[in-house]
Image (cartoon, rainbow, N blue to C red):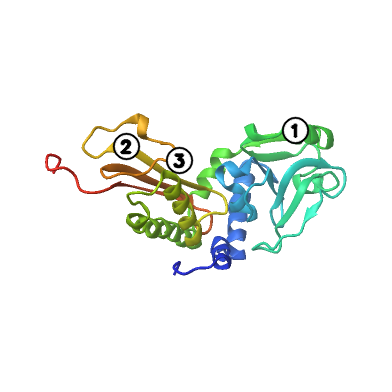
Amino acid sequence: ELKHCTMVHRYEQVRVYTPQEFERRWAVAREVSAKAGCSALLVCGPSAEGFDQYLADVRGLSAVILPVCGGAVGISRGRFDRGDGNPEIRELTHPDIRIMRDYPGDALAELLGPAGSRIAVAYPGAMSAILRDVLDELLPGTELVDVTLQLTVARAAKSEEDLRCIDLANRVHEQAMLAMPQVIRIGRTFRDVSNDIADLLCSLGSGNALIHAFLICVGQMDEPADMRAFFPAPGRVFEPGDRMQVLMETNGPGGHVTAIGRFFCLGQPTAGWQ
């Protein structure tokens, strides 16, 4: 299914959720807010735990607001605008998702509730000084209720669409790992192999946020692991007897991050090692 995919197909794989899936997620998040006695939900620094893509279908946001009704509102730049927040036009999975560059002064009370409200906040420690000042100015007396743990636990229950995407993410890693004997060869450099691994993962459907593909050298196969050899110079040429670990920790279609690691040796071990 992932083989022979083009660049266009890769981004189609990244956005694999239906509008109904986002409505289910919003319902889960609103239930968390309601149990905390709050109306709206504010997620600060959502990229750290992927809540921006989870709620607003976009990675790299400064904050996500889930108002009492309607779709999620993503804040991309995180500054303050006295007007409408500089709306951005993007093609997103759900038509009710809105992305704004800045916090909208005119609509902030509409999104978060009037002054004196209780607002559910996830990751309050990641709240920017700008947002803190905006809340104090426009919504004085607002009480912030930390729901980080409750929201994280609620998200742990996966839907059928989530499980399908996790399976696709695992398959990306498995297919990439099957290609490693052809990628890691004597005479190639550390840089060559590392670049090929990243390119291969992208072509199979990973990317969009996170690609951590580590090539860790652990010395010669007949010797104890040498910490000094773990990350050699980029131009180091692989030789017979080298052993290494390939560790892939990337997000697959849908944004779910999975990991796989395997050891590889170049050439045959000595008779004593056998």
Q: Quadrant of the N terminus?
A: bottom left
In this rendering, the label closer to the viewer, 1 or 2:
2
Horizontal placement of 196 versus 58: left or right?
A: left
Q: Secondary structure at mark 1?
A: helix
Hey, what amino acid is under mark 3?
Pro
Q: Earlier in the sequence, mark 3 or mark 1?
A: 1
Residue 140: image quadrant is top right
Residue 142: image quadrant is top right
Hey, what amino acid is under mark 2?
Val
Q: Which mark is residue 218?
A: 2
Q: Earlier in the sequence, mark 2 or mark 3?
A: 2
Hey, what amino acid is under mark 1?
Arg
Give residue 161's position: percent from left, percent from top.
Answer: 50, 62
Residues at marks 2 and 3, CA–CA distance in whole angstroms: 15 Å
Q: Are marks 2 and 3 in contact (CB under 8 Å)?
A: no
Q: Which residue is mark 3?
A: 234
Q: Secondary structure at mark 2?
A: strand
Vertical order, 140 against 152 (above or below): above
Q: Earlier in the sequence, mark 1 or mark 2?
A: 1
Residues at marks 1 and 2, CA–CA distance in whole angstroms: 48 Å
Characterize the local packing of mark 3: few (<14), some (14-19) or many (20 or more) Cα atoms within 10 angstroms: few
Give residue 166's position: percent from left, percent from top.
Answer: 45, 57
Characterize the local packing of mark 1: few (<14), some (14-19) or many (20 or more) Cα atoms within 10 angstroms: few
